[in-house]
Amino acid sequence: MITLPQRISNKIIPVTESGCWLWTGSCNTSGYAHMCWHRKRKMVHRVVWEIINGEIPFGLTIDHLCRVRCCANPSHLEVV
């Protein structure tokens, strides 16, 4: 069975110039990358953040420092 990190890495293309990890899977109408995992829709940038850093504190959100909504590079994300 494929793991969640493997599934995510299979859908990412790194961009050398910007450092972004562009999601090649589905995006919502606002341009944010999303995926289904165990029959639940998940925002890819949030999943990546939680894999690397742990749970997102209640009431906070994840911001894209690069302003590229389909980017999944954890170094381009911050909790705000």
Image (tube, helix red, strand yellow):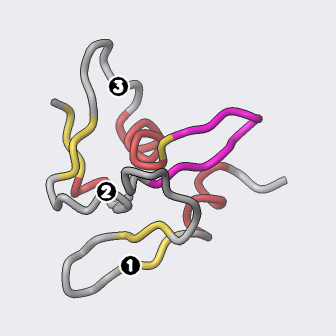
Q: What amino acid is found at the position of numbered circle 1 in the picture?
A: Pro
User: Image point 34% across, 62% down: which residue?
Assistant: 71
Q: Earlier in the sequence, mark 2 or mark 3?
A: 3
In the picture as drawn, the residue positioned furthest to the top comes out as 58
What label does residue 14 carry, if any? 1
Query: In the visual, does 50 lie left or right of 62?
Result: right
Mark 2 lies on residue: 69
Q: How dense is the environment of label 1, judged by Cα within 10 Å: few (below 14), some, or many (20 and up)?
A: some
Residue position marked by numbered label 3 in the rendering: 56
Q: Residue at x 68, y 33 (%)?
A: 40
Q: Which residues are magenta?
A: 33-42
Q: Is residue 52 above or below residue 76?
A: above
Q: Position of residue 56 (x, y in %)?
A: 35, 25
- Taking 71 as reference, is 27 left or right? right
- Circle 2: element type: loop
Q: Is residue 63 left or right of residue 55?
A: left
Q: Secondary structure at mark 3?
A: loop
**What whole-number distance in Å separates the C-alpha atoms at marks 1 and 3?**
24 Å
